[in-house]
Image (cartoon, grey):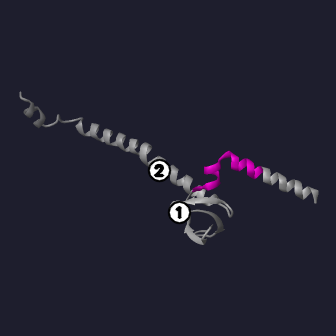
Amino acid sequence: MNLLSIFLQAPAPGGGNSMMLIMMGAMFVGFYFLMIRPQMKKQKQEKNFQETLKVGTRVVLTSGLHGRIAQVQDDGFVIETLSGKLKFEKAAVSREFTESRFGEKAKAAAEKTAEKKEIDLEKK
């Protein structure tokens, strides 16, 4: 038999269809765990991040604009920048500026200022 006639032969009857269904199911499960599930997890984290933002938080928007949240509204944020106040959708907030840029230093500085305020209040 030559090679062409081997490729043109019909598949053996019987187990071919069930094996194909098993392979399709395995591919779907693989796609779910490799693509769909991580994307859903990322969306959930972004939504949780956007819901926890408060007034006064310094943020970076997806456009690269840096600012401070002046107001939190139902449909978005009012961001205060050097040029004024601008309204943006909640989805436009990319990350928190202070934590991403300064990390532990920003947290330590915030704790020190809070301690100083407490000490000043106790003195009065």
The residue carrying mark 1 is: 92
- Per the rendering, the mark at residue 66 is none
Q: Which residue is drawn at 77% across and 50% down?
A: 111
Residue furthest to the top: 1
The quadrant the N terminus occupies is: top left
Tell me where residue 71 sits by quadrant.
bottom right
Foreground residue among 118 and 53: 118
- Left or right of residue 97: residue 15: left
User: What x and y, as percent, mark residue 44?
Assistant: 54, 53
Coordinates of residue 23 in the picture (x, y in percent): 31, 39
Q: Which amino acid does label 1 sit on?
A: Ala
- In percent of width and height, residue 114 lies at 80, 54
Residue toward you, 93 or 83: 83
Rendered residue at 74%/50% (across/down): 109
What is the magenta range? 95-111
Disc 1 secondary structure class: helix
Dot 1 crowding, Cα within 10 Å, few <14, some 14–19, many 20+: some
Quadrant containing the C terminus is bottom right
Foreground of the two, 54 or 7? 54
Disc 2 versus disc 1: distance between alpha carbons?
18 Å
Please rate how many residues cluster around mark 2, counting C-alpha atoms within 10 Å: few if below 14, some from 14 to 19, many from 20: few
Q: What residue type is labelled 2?
A: Gln
Mark 2 secondary-structure assignment: helix
In the drawing, does residue 73 fall left or right of residue 5? Answer: right
Label 2 with label 1: CB-CB less than 8 Å: no
Q: Name the residue located 21 percent from the left edge and 35 percent from the top edge.
A: 14
Label the magenta part by its dominant secondary structure. Answer: helix
Which residue is tagged 2? 39
Magenta stretch holds residue 67: no
Which image quadrant for residue 80? bottom right
